[in-house]
Image (cartoon, grey):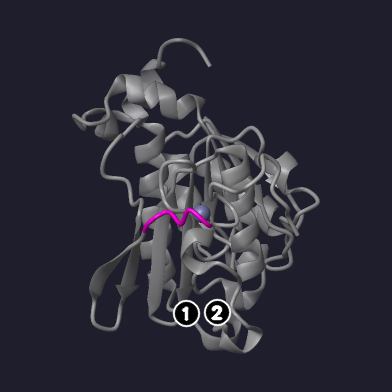
Amino acid sequence: MSERLTTEQIERYSRQIMVPDLGGKTQMRLCRSRVLVIGAGGLGSPAALYLAAAGIGTLAIVDADKVELSNLQRQILHATADIGRPKVESAKATLTKLNPDVEVKTHPVRFDASNAEQIAADCDFIVDGSDNFETKFLVNDIAVKLGIPFSHAGIVRLQGQVMTVVPGRSACYRCLFKTPPAPEEILSCQASGILGAVAGTIGTIQATEAVKYLAGFDEGLLTDRLLVYDAKTLRFREVECRRDPQCAACGAGVPSSIHLG
Ligand SMILES: [Zn+2]
């Protein structure tokens, strides 16, 4: 990446460069940034599309699945012709078509304890678009361990929740939820359904938070508060949260290398 934006880049990003809180220098930062998107599904799709459009330099996408017909109602990175194709390949094609400036790295694997640290190591921000609690806790613990800020989110039916975690500065996911819920308490999208536009709203907030963090916004991040969205009544509410000194991931008693798995 050169030290200046090209004429084409200035035109492509002109409408966000114009925003007083952003500007040309911020655009250069975005163009040098690396964001990891976990899951090319309902949350990862809108998040990755907006991040690619905004000119994030490198987007790494992790997903082990192939595109299915039932995904297309919400996973807008993929089209009907992509059914049967690995999601990371379909995602790369869509994002590259949108913005050839963006380097898209693909990891066609399940993000698990064996590969998480290696995949996350060199990124500046993580968008967690995973659809299960095991992965959400793993993302939290790896991000806290490596000191990488991330956006947590969850969606089901007509509801969503989203929160930004800046390790060492704000409450982490484990400060709030401690341990994964019992299987019988879990409502998954697969079993319970989800309105596609709800995933779009929450995934778009995740992309907004990634851009704000990378742009250097010191205040105003969605930290120490869980934003809960109810599409049925179209209401947002916030649940304030605090760091737990006893937190198993970020608490005072955690040794430098936390246990994963
Ligand atoms: Zn914590």
Closer to the camera in the image, 132 or 77 = 132
Q: Residue at (31%, 34%) from the top-left corner?
A: 217
109 to 176, vertically: above or below: above
Closer to the camera in the image, 190 or 252 = 252
Q: Mark 1 and mark 2 in contact (Cβ < 8 Å)? A: yes
Residue picked out by circle 2: 189
Q: Residue at (60%, 78%) from the top-left corner?
A: 70
Residue 154 in view in this figure:
yes
Please, what secondary structure does the residue beneath circle 1 have? loop
Give how far across and how far down residue 54 sits, in percent.
40, 38
Closer to the camera in the image, 169 or 196 = 169
Q: Which mark is residue 43?
A: none
Q: Quadrant of residue 225?
A: bottom left
Examine the structure image and report whether residue 117 is included in the region drawn in magenta: no
Residue picked out by circle 1: 194
For marks 2 and 1, give the CA distance.
6 Å
Three-letter amino acid code at disc 2?
Answer: Cys
Give how far across and how far down residue 218 sits, in percent.
30, 34
Which residue ends up furthest to the right in the rendered image?
114
Q: Which residues are magenta?
A: 242-246
